[in-house]
Image (cartoon, helix red, strand yellow):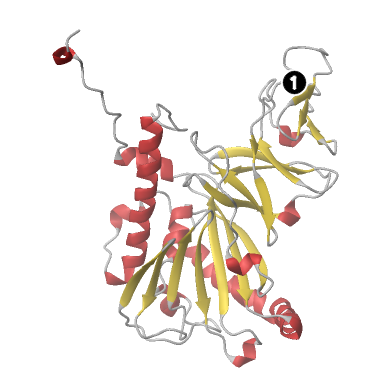
Amino acid sequence: MSASTVSPAVAPPAPTDQDIQGYLATGLRNRWWPILPSRFAEAAGKPVGIVRLGEKLVVWRDAAGVAHVQTDRCPHRSVALSRGVNEGDRLRCIYHGIDIGKDGTVLSVPGQPGCALEGKKAVKTFPAVEVAGAIFVWFGDELHLEPAPFVAPEQLGSDEFSSFLCYADWNASWRYVYDNLMDPMHGTFLHAKSHSMANGDMQAVFATKDHENGFLFEKVGQRDVNFDWSDLIDESVMFVRLEIPYPKTGGPGGNFGIVAISTPIDETNSANFFFRFRKVSGWQRDTWRFLYKTVLEPRHWAVLEQDRELMDGCGLGLEKGEMLYQHDAGLIRLRRYLAQQTRGQLADLLKAGKTWPGRA
C-alpha cells in the first residue's frame, strides 16, 4: 500500500455534555471520598451495606479493627454480602456459605470444595483509610485503579486542630450541596437568626482568587464578619473550607471552621460530612470541646437543618430554572471546574478505549 493510501488515525470521539452530566451525577472519580463515620462500623461486627457514588458497598472491620470496603455482591449468586456474617478475617455469605477474604479472594466454597471459584479474586476491594472519625475510600476510574496518596485536609490531620464530625444523609444531589457551600451570601439571609451569622452587610461584592489546588470565593472587605468566604480545595480529597467568626462567649480558638464534603450516594441523595474545627491545644482544647458538646452543637445542627430543608427533594435539573447574578460567581465557577475535570477524565478513557458505568 502506498503512503498516499494510508488512512489517517481516527481520533476518539470527544465526551459530550450529556456524557459529562451523566458521569457527574454520581460523583467525580479519581478522588478519596468519605463514605461512613468510623463509629458506624464495629470491630468484627455485622457488615454494613451502603451505596456511594452509585456503587453498592459493604463495610466491615476485621478482628483487629481494620476497616475493609468491598463491592456488596457475592460472586456466586450476586446477593448482598452485607447480609452475611463477619468471621473476623473474612465475610461469609449466608446464601451458600461462600467465604470472601479481605482482598476479595474466594477462600472457600463449602458446598463444593476445590471448585474453580476458590482462589479467585472475585470481589472488588477498595483502598480505605480512616481520618478524623471517618472512613475514606478511593474511587478510581479504569485508568486509575491504584490510589493517589491520601492527603488529609490540614485541619483534620494536624494536632494543632481539634474537630468534631457532624454527619447526615440528605435527599439532595451532592452537587447542590457543594453549590450551597460556595454561596457565602446565603448565610446573611437564610441563617440571619443564627447565634453566629447575624452580622454583615446584606449587599456585597465578591472576588475569586485562584490557588494551586482550587479557588477562593470571598466578599470584598468583609473578612471575619460573617460566613464571608468559601475555599474549594481539590487535592486527593475535594472539600470546601470556610470559617465563621465567633464572639468571645464562643470559647477559645478564634474563628469556628468547617471542612465540608458531600459524598454522592446516588443521583439524588448525598452523605454529608461536616468536620467542625478550631485551632486549639492544651486546656483551650478541653474547654472548646466541652463547650461544643454542651452548648454549641445543637445550634449548629439547627443551621444545617435550614440548609437541608431548602435542598430537600431538589432533583437534578434545578439549573434549568435559575437566573443567576454576581453573587453566584462561586457556584458558577465550581460547576465549570467540575465539568472541566470530568471532560479530561472521560477524554482519557475514550482515548484508551475504555468506558464508564452508565454510558449509553
Q: Quadrant of the N terminus?
A: top left
Above/below status of 169 relative to 295 = above
Q: Quadrant of residue 68?
A: top right
Q: How many marks?
A: 1
User: Would residue 188 appear left or right of 9 to someone viewing this image?
Assistant: right
The location of residue 176, given as percent across then percent down, is 43, 57
Above/below status of 239 relative to 13 = below
Give 313 or 74, whichever is nearer the viewer: 74
Label 1 packing within 10 angstroms: few (<14), some (14-19), many (20+): some
Q: Quadrant of residue 48?
A: top right
Q: Residue furthest bottom?
A: 248
Q: Secondary structure at mark 1?
A: loop
Q: Residue furthest left?
A: 4
The structure residue drawn at horizontal position 48% and vertical position 46%, both measured from the top left corner, is 27
**Amino acid at dot 1:** Gly
Residue where numbered disc 1 is placed: 119
The structure residue drawn at horizontal position 31% and vertical position 66%, both measured from the top left corner, is 329
